[in-house]
Every structure is written in C-alpha cells, then in structure tokens.
Image: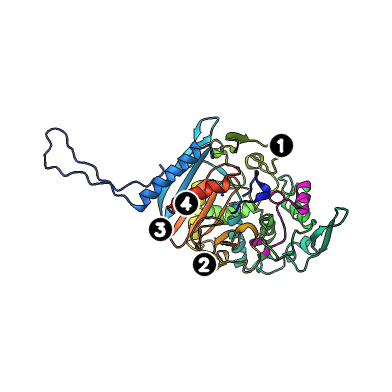
Amino acid sequence: MKHIPNFKYWLFMIGALALTACAHSAPNTAKGASANAELPAPIAVTPQTLRAERLDRVMTNLVDENKIAGVSVLIIENGTESYYGAKGMLDREAGTPMSRDAVGRYYSMTKPIVGVAMMQLYEDGKYKLDDPLSKYLPEFTNMKVFAGVDAQGNSMLVNANRQITVRDLMRHTSGLTYGFITQTPVDAMYLEANILSYEQTSDAFSKKIASMPLLKQPGEQYIYSVSTDVQGRLIEVLSGQSLGDYLETHIFAPLGMSHTGFNVKAADRDKFGPVYSVQDGRFIRLEDEMEKLPFVINEPFLNKKPFESGGGGLVSTLDDYAKFTVMLRARGGKLISPDSHALMTSNQLSDIDNSWLGPNSSFGLNFAIKTAASMEGALPVPKGTYYWGGMAGTSFWIDPTNDIIFIMQMQMITPDEYDNRDRVVRAVYGQ
C-alpha cells in the first residue's frame, strides 16, 4: 500500500517451530573413540535457511535502528510452517519481549475477514453483488456527491449518477472516504461528526454516513474508505446477528480462532501490548488521551462498545490469523466456495482509477491484488499475490505462485510503516 503524501505522520494503513538447518549430530569423539569415526555431516544450506537468516537480520536491524519496538513473522510454505521469528519488545517499559502469543490490534486486517463473511451471505442468496445498497440500507437511496466549493467556500453538491452497489462497497468504489487519510471538505465533515465513534450503534453509524455527501460518484474511483464498516452493518441486517456474533459463529469458531474478536479475552489481557510511534528516533507509547489522534488506541479493545468496526476493530494473534490465511490458501476451505474465493481474488476495478494503490496493484473484494510482475510500487510481492495490512504495521499476503503465506505482527504507527514492511518482504524473496 503506497505512501499517502498528504497524511505523512498518522498513516492508516500492514514451542514455536523455527526452521533449522539439516544437520546430523556428531558421534562421540572423546578420548578413546575410534579414529575412524564418521565425521559430522556438513550443515545443509538451503533457500529456507538463507531466507531465515535474511529475515532474522532485517528484523534485528529494524529494532536496532529504532524503527520498530518489536515484530514477529510467520511463514507457511507448501502448507507447512517454514519460518517463525520474533525480535524486540512487546512492551518496552515492562521489558516484555515480543512473543508468538502476543495479542495485537489488527485494524484493517479486519477487512478481509468481513469480506469472507460477506461472501458467505452471498452464497446463502442474501444479496447479489450488483444489488443497490439501498435495497438493504434505505438510508443510502438518494445520495449527494461533492462537486467542489463555490466562491464563498461552501461545498457544492450534485445528485449521484447511480446507486452505490454492494460490489462498490467491497472494492472501495462507493464514493465514501475515511476522514483522516485524505484532506478534503468531505473528510473534514467526517472528522467533525466523529464518524467512527465507538459509542454509537452500527445503525446510527450507517445513517450518519449516508447523510453526508460522497467524495466521488459511485464507481468512479477507488477510494480507501469506511465502506467495510458499512459492510459490517449490512452483515447485521442480512444475518439478523450482531457483527461480532456473526463472525464468531461463522468464522472464528469454525477455524479455531480463539484469541480473535472485537474485545481482548480476559485470559489474554497480559499478552496485549501497547502501540508505539517513533518521532525523531524516540519511541512514544500511544495512549487514548493523546491529542490529535484520529483513532482510539485501547478503550474499544479492552471494554465492550456499541460499535463493532468492520473496517478495523479486531484483535488477533499471529497463529489465529494464520488459520484464516490457511483457509484462503485452500480457496475458501469449508467457509466459502472456490467460486467465491475466485471473485474475491480477481481484479474488480478493471479500468476504474485505482488511485494510490499504484500501477502494479488492483483490488478484489476486500483486499488488494498484485497485477504485474514488477516489484516496484505497492507491495513488492509476485504477480497474483493478494494481500492487506493494518494501521499498526500488521500485514499478510498469500502468494499462490510460490505457495507462500506470510503474516507479520507489530504494534507501530509510524511514517516508516511502508518502508518497514517492504524491507521484510524483500528479505523473504532475497532482494
């Protein structure tokens, strides 16, 4: 995900088995042993061991350079775990090392999970992708679109050319925006209205967002937005369950994701570390009461709130999220059909302006897709890889060509977010 120039600092949007060399134990060569005893076999240097060395080195360097507090990475290759590594601290002040069972804020990596929930309901015949959103959420019936400002600085509005569709929500072409990624008059309206407040119900959120103008005409441009939060409300309407209950029943429980949800489980509280940022080489522990933060760091994850954010509200662990990615690698496993998986992982933008995704990436349904072999621009992964990340540096990708699943967890909100990710990604592919 490409750097957004006009939002330089608060960027939104990424018994462990470590791979060891194949070595044989040396026989006893103590005094009295046969002089003809077999010599130890040389350590085999494999592509996997070289990758492990690169990853260990890059992660150590990121910690030593004060770019990140702590990080952990898991790689599953050809269906088998081939690497796990952790460096740095989960909690710098407490002296707690980064661990495999650390619980993190996965923020926008909630979106692919919500996408799978949407495809389950699609398979159940609850909606069609090109249905108008207003069929299920009537508040979106008569949308207005921002058309610039007049001489007095007032926003000018026009009627939407067409209805927002469900597909628009899932590929971020709804015309909605986010409020704190870009700086437009519509974003200012979102901020003024505290559009993602955790104190509101999802129904109130949907009605509030529908009362505001769209930034662009539906279908005109990819704009990363609150569209997935609207999907969360849509799931509630279509299923008759709260978003959290639906995800628990239909995704988390079937996959055994016992540490994932909108709230940190009581048994996981001591594994839930802080979020850090770095300013001028100095670590800052982010807290809810800090000024100028357009998001909440701790409260909604530690205490149940009315609003469950489909766009960024889940906590999880490295192994829990790995279970989700393993299901995706299996083309949906038992959760969705291969046809639904194919829809999610196919280019849904076609010739629509893909904005800041970059020239070598596009968007499917609820995550990005690498559309060119070039490693330049967007995430430096092979063509056909699908991926996404979260605001605090979490990241995942699934590379079908090389059969690699990658999941990374950290809790850093920093201007170096994309560079940190790219350095780790390049270490995987030996660049």
Q: Give whichever of discs 1 and 4 has the lower sequence position.
A: 1
Q: Are marks 1 and 4 in contact (CB under 8 Å)?
A: no
Marks 3/4: CA distance?
Answer: 19 Å
How many residues crowd around disc 1 within 10 Å: few (fewer than 14), some, or many (20 or more)? Answer: few
Q: Which residues are magenta?
A: 168-192
Q: Amino acid at mark 4?
A: Arg
Residue drawn at (58%, 41%) of the image: 412
Residue drawn at (58%, 58%) of the image: 367
- Position of residue 247 measured from the top left corner of the image (x, y, whole percent): 60, 54
Q: Which residue is mark 2?
A: 338
Marks 2/3: CA distance?
Answer: 19 Å
As drawn, which residue projects farthest toward the top?
A: 94
Depth check, mark 1 against mark 4: the one in front is: 4
Q: Give whichever of discs 2 and 4 has the lower sequence position.
A: 2
Q: Give whichever of discs 3 and 4 has the lower sequence position.
A: 3
Q: Which residue is mark 4?
A: 426
Label 2 sits on a secondary structure element that is: helix
Marks 1/4: CA distance?
Answer: 35 Å
Can residue 162 be seen by looking at this rendering? yes
Q: Give whichever of discs 1 and 3 has the lower sequence position.
A: 3
Label 1 sits on a secondary structure element that is: loop
Depth check, mark 3 against mark 4: the one in front is: 4
Q: Determine if the magenta segment contains residue 173.
A: yes
Marks 1/3: CA distance?
Answer: 46 Å
Q: Are marks 3 and 4 in contact (CB under 8 Å)?
A: no
Q: Relative to residue 288, is residue 40 drawn left or right?
A: left
Q: Give whichever of discs 2 and 3 has the lower sequence position.
A: 3
| Quarter of the image with the N terminus in it | bottom right
Marks 1/2: CA distance?
Answer: 46 Å
Q: Which residue is mark 1?
A: 291
Q: Which residue is mark 3?
A: 78
Can residue 258 be seen by looking at this rendering? no
